[in-house]
Image: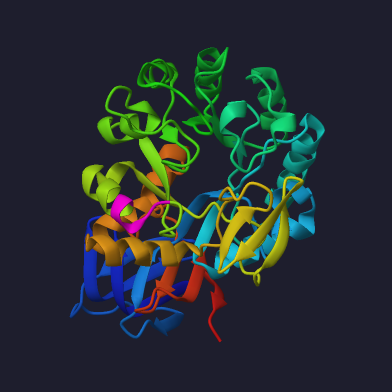
Amino acid sequence: MKTLISNAHIISPGVDIVGGSVLVDGSRIVSVIQPGDALPQADVVIDAQGQMLMPGFIDIHSHGAGGCDTCDAKLESLHTIAECKMKEGVTSWLPTTLTLAPQTLVDVCKTVAEYRKDMKFAKVPGVHLEGPFINPKCCGAQNPAFVRMPDFEEVAALHAITPVKLISLAPEMPGADDFIQKASAEGMTCSAGHSAATHADFTKAKAAGLKHLTHFCNQMSPLHHREIGLVGSGLLDNDIKIEIICDTIHLCPDMLETVFTTKPAEQMLMITDSLSCSWMPDGPGDLGGLPIVVKGGVARLAESGNLAGSTLRFAHGLRNVFEITGIALSELVKATSWNQAQSLGLHDLGKIAPGFTADMVLLDENFDTLQVYIDGALVWEQE
């Protein structure tokens, strides 16, 4: 079946077309039509009414939403989270784990494998293991009781259950470089997070295959004029991709502007790091067995007050960065899906262009989601 989305403001990496149209045949984009050109025949024609049409977002770091957590290890929880993500315009996401017991991680991966057999909402190419191989001095909102040394055999067993696409670990821990080398050889992307690594540690890990920095600036060695740490490494090195929580809380607006005007757009990865309390009212909650409290939409550990992930909805993070920096959306959109797709080997995602999978989101001027398309089908529409 052919679907024509007409009269759209098409925004894709390097592309900004006001009044354009997109022809979809089945799950693929067939053509992008310039304004004024003749429109092709289609079985279904949808008028976008001039709203912004972008590639569907890819959230590579999300623990939960709608009162559910990936680590519930329940299929119904994944359905709830994936539906919430879809309503944000996220068409693919990586269910993200916590630092937990080995059997819990096995149970989570089995549940993800079950979801992948019938992906009712946002697609799941695999999982993101955040921990357990982190620095116990940089736990943040992770549970220190389950921190352990890098163990490739443990992860290989999980990868055999369902694809492990991304692993966050502390590269300064014993055995981390060997782990990164082995994991990278198996197609897993390694990211430094919850880490006190020096720049020298970072350099060694990068040589072993490190590709990302996890939730940049948060729970990582800070920038100092005598040791630049991971924050300085991320700013200095234009090959490393950095995850950014763009809620203006985890990074203040000035830091968001600093990072987005310093790093190439091709190395930025917008994430939500959303928790089960996302899409939920303020109140008490839980994160990996640790009590949290959400007040004013900000989630913190009840005991220490540490930030504990976010309640951010993906498109609103994009809005924040656009309003703060003024960078063209055709540049910023690289950080919402294209860079993620390239890093994870999802080479048919992240652009509105012929031959790409028709995963797209239609947003209004306030960056609220109007429509979501997955594999060419209109799967959600604002009432």
Q: As rendered, which of 96 and 290 lies closer to the eye?
A: 290
The quarter of the picture where residue 37 lies is: bottom left
Q: Tell me if residue 29 can be seen.
A: yes
- Furthest residue in direction left, as rendered: 36
Q: Position of residue 230 (x, y in %)?
A: 39, 30
Magenta stretch, overall SS: helix
Position of the C terminus, as image quadrant, is bottom right
Task: Tell me if residue 150 comes above or below residue 14 in the rendering.
Answer: above
Q: As rendered, which of 264 and 165 lies closer to the eye?
A: 264
Q: Position of residue 350 (x, y in %)?
A: 39, 53
Q: Tell me if residue 118 can be seen.
A: no
Q: Position of residue 290 (x, y in %)?
A: 73, 47
Q: Position of residue 57 (x, y in %)?
A: 45, 58
Residue shown at 62% from the left, 27% from the top: 136
Q: As rendered, which of 346 and 284 lies closer to the eye?
A: 284
Q: Which span is picked out in magenta? A: 251-255
